[in-house]
Image: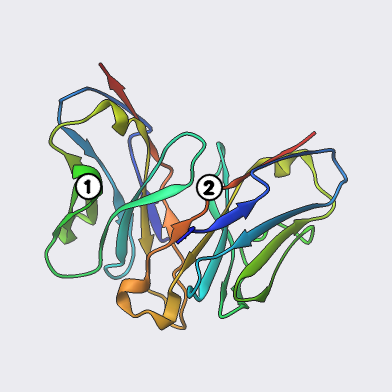
Amino acid sequence: AQSVTQPDIHITVSEGASLELRCNYSYGATPYLFWYVQSPGQGLQLLLKYFSGDTLVQGIKGFEAEFKRSQSSFNLRKPSVHWSDAAEYFCAVDPILTGGGNKLTFGTGTQLKVEL
Amino acid sequence: DAGVIQSPRHEVTEMGQEVTLRCKPISGHNSLFWYRQTMMRGLELLIYFNNNVPIDDSGMPEDRFSAKMPNASFSTLKIQPSEPRDSAVYFCASSLGTSGGVGANVLTFGAGSRLTVL
């Protein structure tokens, strides 16, 4: 079955430390891949996306993600975390269905806590 | 650009009452989506529209839920009658959809409507 997995429900890092959030997908072909961030009481904001081409993509707020086809992964990274990065992060995939529409499927999310 | 606008932001109602959530997508966006977010089930796609036409409503939980998009700038999600298990945050999102090419597969979300059914 098609799925998106974020294995880490909660992650705590110290401010200034590096961060990696994991995302794995299970689809027949390479889908479009996204990372969104949700701050408390807010909607989801797009951090970055991968459609094709360079497998390392840059996003907003200093985030980047690397697509690894062999591992069916799209992990999110940041070299130095800031306290304001505390939020919930969602990986999402679009299986690129024919007939139109962007039917995103979201992972269960990873809650990031930043210790000062 | 005001983004995707949802109303109300918060709704508290009693079981059995009708609830209507509203969404104004970004102007020029041709696709509109309704998602529901709960602690237990995460983010679930309820229904999406392309050019005001419902394309896939397989995520709508049951007949108590209905969604309409009478024009390109307005959509509603209605629950009648509401039940406590409908308590959730409901998000509307829009995208350029099929008219925007590959780069259009990006959803912009509204701030959500938090529904509490007592």
Q: Could you tell me how far apart the alpha carbons at marks 2 and 1 are, in whole angstroms?
A: 26 Å
User: Which corner quadrant holds the C terminus of chain A?
Assistant: top left
Vertical relation: A80 (above or below) B77 = above
**Residue type pointed to by label 2:** Ala
Left or right of B60 in this view: A24: left
Residue A17 placement: quadrant:
top left
Q: Chain of mark 2?
A: B
Residue A102 at x, y percent in the picture: 44, 70
Q: Is residue A114 above or below residue B63?
A: above
Residue for point 78% across, 61% down: B63
Callout 2 crowding tier (Cα within 10 Å): few <14, some 14–19, many ≥20: many
| Circle on res. B69 | none
Write down the residue under mark 1.
A75
Q: Is residue B103 left or right of residue B83?
A: left
Q: Quadrant of residue B23?
A: bottom right
Indicate whether B26 appears above or below B36: below
Q: Residue at x 64, y 68 (%)?
A: B74
Task: Name the residue type under label 1.
Answer: Asn
Q: Position of residue B98 (x, y in %)?
A: 43, 80
- The chain containing the residue under callout 1 comes to A
At which x and y percent is residue A60? 24, 49
Depth check: give the residue in front, B41 or A112.
A112
Residue B78 coordinates in the image, percent (x, y): 75, 58
Count of marks, rendered view: 2
Which residue has dot 2 on it?
A: B111
Q: Quadrant of the N terminus of chain A?
A: bottom left
